[in-house]
């Protein structure tokens, strides 16, 4: 088995910024409530003519430039998203084609906000097993198009963006361990009820908001804190590491209070945790790769640093990956 490392990172967020003050004009909310309950100040939203693949494409181009590689140098393209351009074909096929990468493997991963964590495990495994030499993993979302803009409990939370990493076969191995999990017994806690085969979209028959994101925030909050800590613990144990060995925490950006709980548990000081929730809100599968790309480009992450990537979301699902930066 060979090793794997990340040789390029990139990210992109749409130009349009929706700040808390703008949301105050939509429904009964306040900058104070949103900031204190979530840590969010702004989020980036797509224009009507931008789809998920457009954001993914921009992040992919950034990552290729960062790695000094051409699209044809990548053997497989993987997009983690909960809101693809179409039900099918896979958004990854569109991205690879628009990059000019001909005849390459391309597929999507859909496991909501855990998409990057699951994706990193799958793509690392493809490289470590010797199936592919280089794989691009992109987390990309346009959840502003899927939120119920009349539901103040969810409309404030979600933003759009994309982050990409390029994985390459290497003598050193950055992938130390992964812990993935799911519990599909209560899909109603966080879902879009209509639009799939369980309930195909028939707008005449839909109840209000059934084709939009619905979340039982308080339940999901409790689950998120519990699973984030448990997944981190389990992944560290698999890697044979202790909490004190962790140099960096790069968590899914769903709520600053959830991140704070994980930081407290791991005893990680603020400068060792990547938080950009104030700028982007919750970008689902894109949040961890955007945070990673920003941290790497700012020179915050150094070779040898042990990073814990940890995420959770719809499914319900969760996961953590322990990674040694090379
Ligand atoms: O990435 C996927 C995973 N997602 C998550 O992990 C999100 C997890 N959940 C959360 O982050 C939090 O539960 C929320 C941020 C969604 C909500 O925060 P909360 O502290 O759990 O608030 P709550 O739902 O318990 O609501 C408290 C009050 C309610 O009013 P009453 O019933 O106490 O009168 C809500 O109606 O806050 C009200 N509220 C709002 N008030 C002003 C809900 N949304 C808003 C709002 N502005 N935007």
Image (cartoon, rainbow, N blue to C red):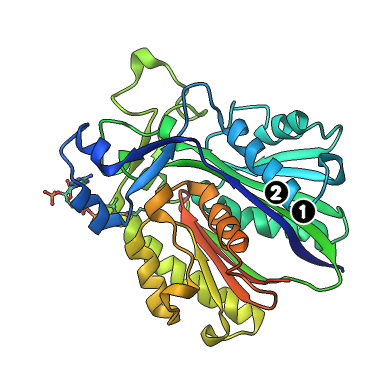
Residue 258, image quadrant? bottom left
Mark yes or no: residue 3 visible: yes
255 vs 65, nearest the viewer: 65
Q: Position of residue 152 (x, y in %)?
A: 24, 39
In the rendered view, tell whether residue 238 sits above or below residue 106: below
231 relative position to 188: left or right: right
Residue 67 has which mark?
1
Q: Return the x and y of residue 19 as percentages of the image width and height.
A: 31, 41
In the rendered image, residue 154, in percent from the top left (x then y), is placed at 31, 42
What is the count of numbered marks?
2
Distance (Cα) linking label 1 and label 2:
6 Å
- Up-down relation of residue 201 to residue 241 (above or below): above
Which residue is located at x 59 percent, y 81 percent? 237
As drawn, the label of residue 193 is: none
Q: Residues within 10 Å of mark 1 (few under 14, many from 20)?
A: some
Viewer-proximal residue among 32 and 198: 32
253 displayed left or right of 118: left
* Foreground pick, 305 / 285: 305
- Name the quadrant of the N terminus: bottom right
- Disc 1 element: helix
Label 2 CA crowd tier, 10 Å (few <14, some 14–19, many 20+): many
Q: Is residue 158 visible?
A: no
Return the x and y of residue 146 as percentages of the image width and height.
42, 32
Q: Are marks 1 and 2 in contact (CB under 8 Å)?
A: yes
Residue visible at 54% across and 26% down in the picture:
50
Residue at (48% x, 49% y) in the render: 315
The single residue placed furthest to the top in the displayed view is: 204
Q: Is residue 9 above or below residue 55?
A: below
Q: Which residue is mark 2?
A: 63
Q: Is residue 303 left or right of residue 287?
A: right
* Residue 117 drawn above or below residue 187: below
Look at the numbered disc 2 and give the secondary structure of its residue.
Answer: helix
């Amino acid at each position: 088995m060979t090793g794997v490392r990340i040789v390029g990172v990139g990210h992109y967020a749409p130009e349009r910024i929706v700040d808390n003050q703008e949301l105050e004009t939509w429904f009964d909310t306040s900058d104070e409530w949103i900031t204190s309950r979530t840590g969010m100040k702004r989020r980036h939203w797509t224009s009507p003519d931008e789809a998920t693949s457009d954001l993914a494409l921009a992040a992919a181009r950034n990552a290729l430039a960062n790695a000094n590689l051409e699209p044809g140098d990548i053997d497989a393209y993987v997009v983690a998203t909960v809101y693809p351009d179409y039900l099918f074909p896979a958004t990854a096929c569109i991205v690879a084609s628009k990059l000019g990468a001909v005849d390459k493997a391309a597929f999507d991963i859909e496991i909501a906000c855990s998409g990057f964590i699951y994706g990193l495990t799958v793509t690392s495994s493809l490289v470590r097993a010797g199936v592919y030499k280089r794989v691009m993993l992109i987390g990309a979302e346009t959840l502003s198009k899927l939120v119920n803009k009349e539901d103040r409990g969810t409309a404030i939370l979600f933003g759009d963006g994309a982050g990409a990493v390029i994985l390459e076969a290497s003598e050193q191995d950055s992938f130390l361990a992964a812990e993935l999990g799911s519990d599909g017994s209560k899909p109603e806690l966080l879902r879009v009820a209509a639009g799939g085969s369980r309930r195909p979209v028939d707008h005449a028959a839909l109840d209000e908001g059934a084709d939009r994101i619905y979340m039982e925030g308080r339940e999901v909050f409790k689950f998120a804190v519990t699973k984030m800590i448990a997944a981190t613990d389990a992944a560290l144990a698999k890697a044979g590491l202790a909490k004190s060995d962790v140099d960096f925490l790069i968590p899914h950006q769903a709520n600053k209070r959830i991140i704070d709980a994980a930081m407290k548990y791991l005893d990680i000081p603020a400068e060792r945790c990547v938080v950009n929730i104030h700028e982007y809100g919750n970008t689902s599968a894109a949040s961890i790769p955007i945070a990673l790309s920003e941290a790497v480009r700012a020179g915050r992450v150094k070779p040898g640093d042990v990073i814990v990537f940890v995420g959770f979301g719809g499914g319900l699902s969760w996961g953590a990956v322990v990674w040694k930066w090379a």
